[in-house]
């Protein structure tokens, strides 16, 4: 026996050696042998990770030890079933790799070593993922992946109904694993509620959740019975329990439940009891919060030992053989782990960022070609509605959904008539839950559809913003583009609604979006721009896999007039010209002052410019149109024409877009005069008090005159 076995390994090897081969046992299924190999290799990888860390050669020590029974779930499903895995689902990953003859061990070792040639994340993170195995990489998986799993299951069925191509087989089952502590997360509860809601309404949803319950959330114990009580609180979900230290029962339960989900297209949960070995991670000292007798008692629930017993009892192996196989795997995997540490890592920032937000402007322009452009002069709301109709007509895989977007046509009428024209399978209402809305977008997008979800108000995005930040925006980055989830998220926002709403209907904070790497943020103000920019976003979602946010200024939805009542100068015909991502538009009116703005700020600035002309000040106004990426070259060019630039920012002073524009101008070497005016660092109150904190025309005019006066 190797001299450096740790106590867990010593116990495992000694108990394996004590097993006697039965001559009267029933032969196990072929899956038992595949599971054994996957479990042994997964355990050996976890020990190798600690060994590498001790030598300062490894970077990741959160392991799967004690959870290896999830390999049986892999073998109960098909290798074409999309899987979103918990970070302790190493056994599952290796078993699925074994199903198709893929070397999953090398994948995992390269990930631990942060090697640039690791096949899914390329050294950017240690994840379980492989397109050929239908395993979608997850990064943190503190339940944030569950809403996407609901969305994928929905997409499989909806694509079939619409006779559309999908990434997955028509009879696929989605497998999604998570931990017992994660069950308490609001995101998990949102996903389970959404799945139950689909089932309650009789809508098909082929989804198998797997709750891997080891009874601990790092150091915090899960109360005995809590997981079962929580899961059984939703009778619409079929729930079965299996014990990881009883592999025959666990395999049969998983197989029967997966088959039931596949046949009935109904969501279910497998409550898989596991045990956690080797503490939470390498830096976690388990003895600081768990008594030694409790830790020792867990050794008898070892799933690797249990599978060894299964094989020995069936007569397939002798105990000595099983112990030797573990020790051989241990040596082999240590050698391969050392080899993995010699592989090159990412060497430059450019290499790291390469898959973050790929852009193919020519492909986007080709897909965004105009069609059905009308000469009719429309409001902003009408222009967006027309653009959505155009997208649904030209892209059969496009879906429009959100709260109230269906029969009602949206709370502001922006989607009016779309459901009647395109049907309730393509334009539909959702739960009043932004996490579910974005989860459906994540799942349909990765499945090959083009989701255009609506978030009814910007303030309500914050309930679910991590679905954009932690899931949508990271997918291409952590899969090197092997998986993409292009989407266009329409968000109704900003202030200036007269006599309505207070903060939650007038939120003007966009800082939470602007720092998400790779996110495209469009924010049209004029009706003519809105349709063209929406076409561009849909095209970018399809061609580049871009995650686009389309911020719509509610106060301008039905605005018709610019200067005087009845002038109808705010109406416009949808532009026939293509508007590239990151392209500004300049309203030229003079060379004394350049105003840089967007959204409601454009409306304020155009009105203010007429007042400034009375003071002899000629103003050109740059409408950013895109908040990410910012059109910096155009801003710098126009600012340099006048040498005097005022940034008009309708958002809050701290964390607002204006901060970014000013910083970029200075970084680019702009040496003209520069000022910024913005709304106050405040939430928007109800009624007339809103004018006290939102940017006004008077403030814009005063700031412009101060700047010009010097």
Image (cartoon, rainbow, N blue to C red):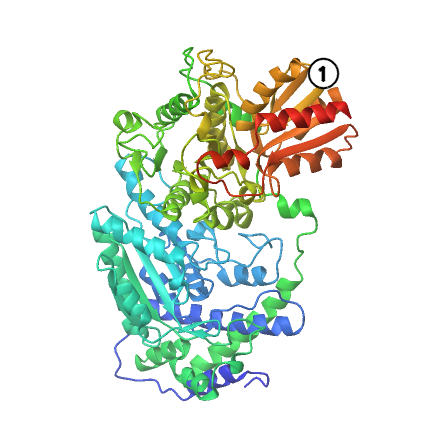
Q: How many marks?
A: 1
Which residue does the image show at 47% across and 82% down from the upper left? 290
Residue 396 visible somewhere in the drawing: yes
Which residue does the image show at 41% across and 63% down from the upper left? 182
Where is residue 670? Give x, y as percent.
77, 30
Work out whether 31 lies above or below 426: below
Where is residue 87? Give x, y as percent.
47, 63
Q: Provide the secondary structure element on which disc 1 rests.
A: loop
Label 1 CA crowd tier, 10 Å (few <14, some 14–19, many 20+): some
Viewer-side residue, 440 vs 560: 560
Work out whether 572 lies above or below 102: above
Question: In the image, is 340 to the left or to the right of 559?
Answer: right
Where is residue 53? Give x, y as percent.
63, 71
Residue 587 visible somewhere in the drawing: no
Question: In the image, is 56 to the left or to the right of 431?
Answer: right
Which image quarter: residue 145? bottom left
Identify the residue under disc 1: 591
Q: Residue furthest front?
A: 688
Name the image quarter holding the N terminus.
bottom right
Which residue does the image show at 35% across and 66% down from the upper left? 72
Where is residue 652? Give x, y as percent.
58, 39
């Amino acid at each position: 026996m190797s001299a450096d076995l740790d106590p867990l390994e010593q116990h495992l090897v000694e108990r394996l050696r004590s097993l006697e081969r039965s001559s009267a046992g029933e032969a196990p299924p072929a899956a038992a042998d595949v599971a054994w190999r996957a479990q042994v290799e997964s355990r050996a990888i976890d020990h190798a990770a600690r060994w590498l860390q001790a030598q300062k050669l490894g970077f990741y020590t959160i392991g799967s030890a004690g959870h290896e029974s999830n390999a049986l779930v892999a073998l109960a499903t098909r290798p074409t079933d999309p899987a979103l895995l918990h970070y302790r689902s190493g056994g599952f990953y290796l078993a699925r790799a074994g199903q198709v003859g893929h070397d999953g061990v090398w994948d995992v070792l390269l990930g631990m070593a942060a090697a640039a040639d690791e096949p899914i994340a390329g050294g950017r993170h240690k994840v379980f993922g492989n397109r050929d195995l239908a395993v979608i990489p997850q990064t943190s998986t503190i339940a944030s992946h569950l809403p996407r799993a609901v969305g994928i299951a929905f997409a499989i069925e909806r694509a079939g109904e619409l006779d559309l191509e999908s990434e997955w087989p028509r009879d696929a089952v989605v497998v999604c694993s998570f931990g017992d502590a994660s069950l308490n997360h609001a995101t998990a509860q949102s996903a389970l509620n959404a799945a139950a809601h689909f089932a309650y309404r009789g809508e098909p949803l082929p989804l198998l959740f797997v709750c891997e319950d080891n009874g601990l959330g790092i150091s915090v114990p899960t109360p005995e019975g809590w997981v079962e009580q929580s899961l059984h609180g939703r009778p619409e979900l079929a729930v079965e329990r299996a014990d990881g230290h009883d592999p025959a029962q666990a395999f049969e339960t998983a197989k029967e439940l997966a088959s039931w989900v596949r046949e009935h297209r109904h969501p279910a949960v497998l409550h898989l009891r596991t045990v956690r070995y080797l503490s939470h991670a390498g830096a976690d000292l388990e003895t600081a919060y768990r008594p030694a007798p409790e830790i020792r008692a867990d050794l008898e629930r070892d799933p690797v030992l249990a599978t060894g017993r299964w094989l020995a009892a069936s007569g397939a192996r002798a105990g000595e053989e099983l112990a030797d196989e573990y020790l051989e795997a241990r040596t082999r995997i240590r050698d391969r782990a050392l080899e993995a540490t010699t592989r090159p890592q990412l060497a430059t920032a450019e290499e790291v960022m390469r898959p973050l937000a790929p852009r193919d402007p020519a492909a986007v322009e080709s897909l965004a070609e105009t069609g059905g452009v009308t000469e009719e002069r429309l409001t902003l709301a009408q222009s967006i509605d027309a653009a959505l109709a155009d997208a649904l007509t030209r892209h059969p895989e496009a879906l429009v959904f959100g709260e109230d977007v269906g029969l009602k046509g949206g709370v502001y009428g922006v989607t009016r008539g779309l459901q009647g024209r395109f049907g309730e399978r393509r334009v539909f209402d959702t739960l009043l839950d932004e996490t579910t809305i974005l989860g459906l977008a994540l799942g349909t997008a990765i499945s090959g559809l083009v989701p255009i979800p609506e978030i009814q108000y910007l303030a309500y995005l914050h309930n679910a913003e991590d679905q954009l930040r932690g899931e949508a925006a990271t997918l291409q980055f952590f899969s090197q583009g092997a998986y993409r989830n292009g989407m266009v998220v329409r968000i109704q926002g900003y202030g200036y609604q007269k006599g309505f709403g207070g903060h939650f209907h007038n939120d003007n904070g966009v800082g939470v979006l602007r720092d998400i790497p790779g996110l495209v943020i469009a924010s049209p103000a004029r009706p003519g721009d809105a349709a063209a920019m929406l076409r561009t976003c849909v095209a970018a979602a399809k061609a580049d896999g871009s995650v686009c946010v389309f911020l719509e200024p509610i106060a301008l939805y039905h605005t018709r007039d610019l200067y005087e009542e009845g002038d109808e100068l705010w109406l416009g015909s949808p532009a026939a010209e293509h508007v590239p991502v990151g392209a500004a538009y300049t309203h030229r009116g003079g060379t004394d002052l350049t105003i840089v703005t967007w959204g409601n700020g454009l409306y304020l600035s155009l009105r203010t410019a007429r007042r400034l002309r009375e003071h002899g000040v000629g103003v050109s106004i740059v409408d950013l149109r895109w908040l990410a990426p910012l059109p910096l070259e155009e801003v710098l060019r126009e600012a340099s024409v006048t040498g005097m630039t005022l940034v008009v920012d309708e958002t809050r002073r701290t964390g607002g877009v204006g901060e970014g524009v000013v910083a970029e101008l200075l970084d680019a070497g702009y040496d003209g005069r520069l000022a910024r005016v913005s709304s106050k660092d405040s939430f928007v109150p109800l009624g007339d008090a809103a004018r006290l904190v939102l940017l006004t025309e008077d403030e814009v005019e005063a700031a412009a005159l101060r700047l010009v006066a010097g």
